[in-house]
Image (cartoon, grey):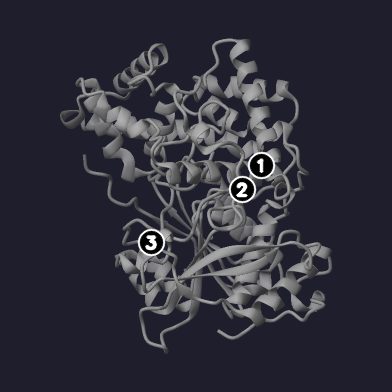
Amino acid sequence: MRGSRPKKRVAALGSAGALVTATLIAGAVAAPANASAGSGYGQDREARGAGIAAARAAKAGIDWQDCPADWNLAKPIQCGYVTVPLDYAKPYGKQIKLAVDRIGNTGTKADRQGALVYNPGGPGGSGLRFPTRVTSKNAVWANAAKAYDFVGFDPRGVGRSAPISCVDPQEFVKAPKADPVPDSEADKLAQRKLAREYAEGCQERSGAMLPHMTTPNTARDLDVIRAALGEKKLNFLGVSYGTYLGAVYGTLFPGHVRRMVVDSVVNPSRDKIWYQANLDQDVAFEGRWKDWQDWVAKNDATYHLGTTRAAVQAKWLELRATAKKNPIGGVVGPAELISFFQSAPYYDSAWASTASVFSKYVAGDTQALVDAAAPDLSDTAGNASSENGNAVYTAVECADAKWPTSWRKWDRDNTRLHKDHPFMTWANAWMNLPCATWPAKQQTPVNVKTGKGLPGVLIVQSERDAATPYEGAVELHKRFKGSRLITEKDAGSHGVTGLVNPCINPRVDSYLLTGKLDGADVTCAAHATPKP
């Protein structure tokens, strides 16, 4: 399951059943042309290739211009491209261009500490909106913006960076899709066929890119971007999947990190990437779904959906059954419902809006639900973006690790989990099943660990996060020596650093501005609960 902010609810699993969008980043370099081990690049072919590409990028820089009109990034944000090898083992072979953007620091020249590069997650999320945190005067980021240029980028395969595709976007968003919860072996067979066809579509439409769509390659790209920016060391903010990108970057380039904040952490253990990580999400999603239902019940005076969690769940099951029998508005079935309702366990900011749509439906207004959960076939740009995001999600997770190929294993694991965690389990399974028949090479995940020169990393995590369960933060904390963990207790919103929390925001600022971490790990009270 994707772990970046859901776009308008269009998606449903690839072409396989329910799509769950949303799980489920001063001075010049550096590396000599031969990029030997002493340069901090290491000896393998990819490491040497990364050194060559970074040296080239440092020399070339970035030709910053006003952003193209259709990027929707107004002045003073500037845009440009950084060229990277498709395959780092062949640094002089085929090259691709990565889209980057920036806004200069808002403070004085003396205040400036370089560039802060951002990845929002996914895999498949675009970071190009990051500079708009400055133009929109986002108060949480005002102090950091005084010191840093805010730099975003589209990772390889995403958006404006050699985008990949697996299926026609209009087909991808068509609704209603099959109920992800199977009633029979025939239902499972149909979903397996869709997953296999989706994997084949990726190969047909984007085959040349697939073997190179890995997190380590994106980490190498990040180092080339650092060099192109003229930065000796990288300042990085990664959220969700962006934390795994940061963890891999910190492992491959420990001496190139200056400051790193990781927020809502993917468990970097090789045993978790990516099959087990997705099963762990199903458990965490069920817990956070219940948290939301408790809140809805507490606010029954507003929503009239029941005064207990059980009553709200009964209404949900009734809605689901109705939509299964007869899709609402002809387009909203169980798959589309899950795609819409999963925003609530992801983000507290979606609690009230999701409850409000549900409440209107129960009171007889079905149109609000159709507007919220059905695809908009006229939004061709949005649909292309959703399809691309799902393609990258699938390509990266499938290529990063070896997935089980035995359907018996998938069936056994998901059947068992579904019993107590029915909200998300099967939808998530079908979303990931293309990896079982993936047509391109699958790697062994990087062994994330502390290397020479890695500074203290700041880790921020809410205790009840659904998309990236808490254990992931604990695991990265163990692996990155000298790191500090801030835990937001009794909270579960995905992406903590963007929320207002007077215990957390000043600590993030202090680390980014001074490099100082607390002497010990910190537990903070939850940010304010959403108001109905």
| Nearer mark to the viewer, of 1 and 3 | 1
Task: State the SS at label 3.
Answer: loop
Which residue bears the numbered disc 2? 164
Per the rendering, the mark at residue 143 is none
- Note whether residue 122 is visible: yes
Task: State the SS at label 1.
Answer: helix
Crowding at dot 1, Cα within 10 Å, few <14 / some 14-19 / many 20+, comes out as some
For the residue pair 519 and 309, the one nearer the viewer reads as 309
Tell me the residue at 66%/42% (across/down): 205
Tell me the residue at 31%/39% (across/down): 351
Is 99 displayed left or right of 49 in the figure? Answer: left
As measured in the structure, the alpha-carbon distance from the residue carrying label 1 to the one carrying label 3 is 44 Å
Tell me the residue at 75%/61% (across/down): 94
As measured in the structure, the alpha-carbon distance from the residue carrying label 1 to the one carrying label 2 is 7 Å
Q: Of the residues under marks 1 and 2, which one precedes in the sequence?
A: 2
Q: Of the residues under marks 2 and 3, which one precedes in the sequence?
A: 2
As measured in the structure, the alpha-carbon distance from the residue carrying label 2 to the one carrying label 3 is 37 Å
Q: Quadrant of the C terminus?
A: top left
Which residue bears the numbered disc 3? 504
- Amino acid carrying mark 1 in the image: Arg
- Amino acid carrying mark 2 in the image: Ile
Q: Position of residue 21 (x, y in %)?
A: 49, 38
Q: Quadrant of residue 59?
A: bottom right
- Amino acid carrying mark 3 in the image: Ile
Q: Are marks 1 and 2 in contact (CB under 8 Å)?
A: yes
Is 255 displayed left or right of 119 in the figure? Answer: right
Per the rendering, the mark at residue 205 is 1
For the residue pair 505 and 165, the one nearer the viewer reads as 165
Tell me the residue at 39%/60% (across/down): 72
